[in-house]
Amino acid sequence: MSKDNPEEFYSRLKEELTTTHTWPTDYLYKFIVPSDPEKIERIQRIFDNTGAVIESRKSSKGKYTSLSVTIHLQNPDEVISKYKEVGEVEGVISL
């Protein structure tokens, strides 16, 4: 994501999601998170009660955890909303 202009980034993302997906659809998020249980739990809470399937895997040295979140969403705005929520968690890398 562009740190300089996040709104421009999200605008381009919305356009891309609109043209490459048929909505509603299942969407796969991938995040790399420092292996801090509090941060991982915060991300899991963002997707609580949404029907999301969350898979996690620690890196070989255990310093980081990858989270794959599959969720059924209605439109690109919902995708972007979740990216913004997760983006508030310090140290998270969205792939």
Image (spheres, rainbow, N blue to C red):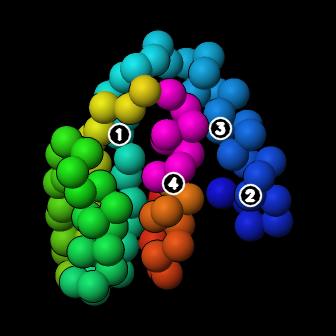
User: Earlier along the polypeptide chain: callout 4 or callout 1?
Assistant: 1
The amino acid type found where label 3 is placed reads: Leu
Amino acid carrying mark 1 in the image: Leu
Earlier sequence position, callout 3 versus callout 4: 3
- The quadrant in which the N terminus is found is bottom right
Q: Is residue 76 magenta?
A: yes
Q: Dot 1: within a 10 Å radius of its alpha carbon, few (fewer than 14), some, or many (20 or more) residues?
A: some
Which residue is identified by label 4? Answer: 83
Name the residue rendered at 57%, 37% in the picture: 77
| Residue 69 visible at all | yes
Check disc 1 and report the residue beneath it: 28
What kind of residue is marked 4? Tyr
Q: Earlier in the sequence, mark 1 or mark 2?
A: 2
Task: Give the labeled residue for mark 2.
Answer: 6
Q: Is residue 43 magenta?
A: no
| Residue closer to the observer: 79 or 13 | 79
> N-terminal of the two: label 3 or label 2?
2
Q: CA distance from mark 1 to mark 2?
A: 20 Å
Dominant SS of magenta comes to helix
Gap in Å between the C-alphas at discs 3 and 1? 14 Å
The residue under label 3 is: 13
- What residue is drawn where x is 49% and y is 40%? 78
* Labels 3 and 4 touching (C-beta < 8 A): yes
Q: CA distance from mark 3 to mark 2?
A: 10 Å
Separation of residues labelled 3 and 4 (CA atoms): 11 Å
Say which residue appears at 49% left-offset and 81% top-offset: 90
